[in-house]
Image: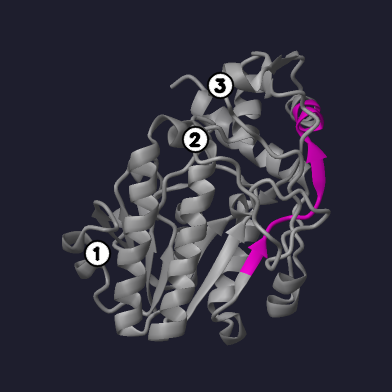
Amino acid sequence: MRVLVTGGAGFVGSHLVDAHVARGDDVVVVDDLSTGRLDNIEAHVQAGRVRFCQGLAEDPAVLYPAFEGVELVYHLAAAVGVFRILAHPLASIRTNLDASSAVFELAAARGIRTLFTSTSEVYGKNASDALKESDDTIYGATKVHRWLYAVSKATDEFLALAQCQESGLPVTIVRLFNTTGPRQTGAYGMVVPRFVRQALEGQPLTVFGDGSQLRCFANVHDVVAAMMALAATPAAVGEVVNVGNPRETSISDLAALVCRIVGSKSPVQLVDYQAAYGAGFEDMRRRVPDVSLLRSLIGFVPTTPLEETIAEIARDLARDLAPS
């Protein structure tokens, strides 16, 4: 089939492109390269398996030609990373809302199966033992820009579900919990590649806050497999589905694990949230997915051990850091 991936030159998007090309599909990628990298998909472009459309997903001059003959849409284009969002709040809001509105409208008008990648950020401050898709969202004050990403992605979910209800858009929303793997950059606040790079370079591993906050990390290959399976599952239409690995680890333990796997003696340096992100930053103490709905729909959940994922990231980054 012909598949459209918005944000397809980014971290998750490019792995999704790889998987569809490997399956024999023709792929169209829309990406403005603000955070994505053409290098991630260039081999497919050169081989004629991917058609690359550089530009904004909300731009009709880019989006309409990209939709030609498409049978499946993955909408991943969005503002990413805490650092970038705090630095560019207005652009982040516009990117998330305008792109999603344009993609959903066009997909609904043509009845195209669509999968939208939302985020566990929509749960906000809710620190329940295992977050279910039906759980409440709890946000901070609007003056705290940290929450604008969560609120804009939640609004995108409302847009998708409204199009599903009123226009029959066959859409599935996936709430990605922390996803990591090769090609992910630490430049925008992603913690695992940042720790791995610091360990490889012998630099201190900078842990924001006290390091006791708990997170769950899923391997990108598992996440892509789950997304593709959901896209092929009719029962997933109209659903919001958590996608993540439910294994918890503290950020301090993550730093120690990275050092052990990389073989680094780098020290750990605690950095106050205010120093890292500015005054008024708020973080969640815990974020764990309930993946029972995912398991019931497709029969599997992400389970790749974090140790294996860290080693994979280390091999990838070591190639980048090797002298040319």
Q: Farthest residue toward the left?
A: 61
Residue 254 counted in the magenta span: yes
* CB-based contact (under 8 Å), mark 1 and mark 3: no
Note whether 233 is above or below 149 in the view shown: below
| Depth order, front residue of 64/316 | 64
For marks 2 and 3, give the one nearer the viewer.
2
Of residues 77 and 2, the one drawn nearer to the viewer in this rendering:
77
Q: Which residue is mark 2?
A: 143
Tell us which disc is closer to us: 1 or 3. Answer: 3
Whether residue 34 appears in magenta in the rendering, the answer is no
> Dot 1: what SS?
helix
* Labels 2 and 1: the sequence-earlier one: 1
At 76% from the left and 38% from the top, the residue drawn is: 285
Rate crowding at label 2 as few (under 14), some (14 to 19) or many (20 or more) other CA atoms within 10 Å. Answer: few
Q: Which residues are magenta?
A: 241-256
Q: Which amino acid does the dot numbered 3 rest on?
A: Ala
Residue 271 horizontal/vertical position (percent)? 67, 17
Residue 162 at least partly seen: yes
Among numbered discs 1 and 3, the one appearing first in the sequence: 1
Q: Residues within 10 Å of mark 3 (few under 14, many from 20)?
A: few
Q: What residue is shown at x 55% (from left), y 24% (from top)?
A: 277
Q: Report the Cα–Cα distance between label 1 and label 3.
A: 39 Å
* 245, above or below 294, in the image: above
- Asked if 56 appears above or below 311 in the picture, the reply is below
Name the spot of residue 23 as percent of width and height, x first.
Answer: 49, 71
Asked which secondary structure carries label 3, the reply is loop
Name the residue carrying label 1: 63
Contact? badges 2 and 3 (CB < 8 Å): no
Gap in angstroms between the C-alphas marked 2 and 1: 33 Å
Q: Residue at x 69, y 57 (%)?
A: 244
Mark 2: which amino acid? Lys
Dividing the picture into quarters, in which one does residue 256 lie?
top right
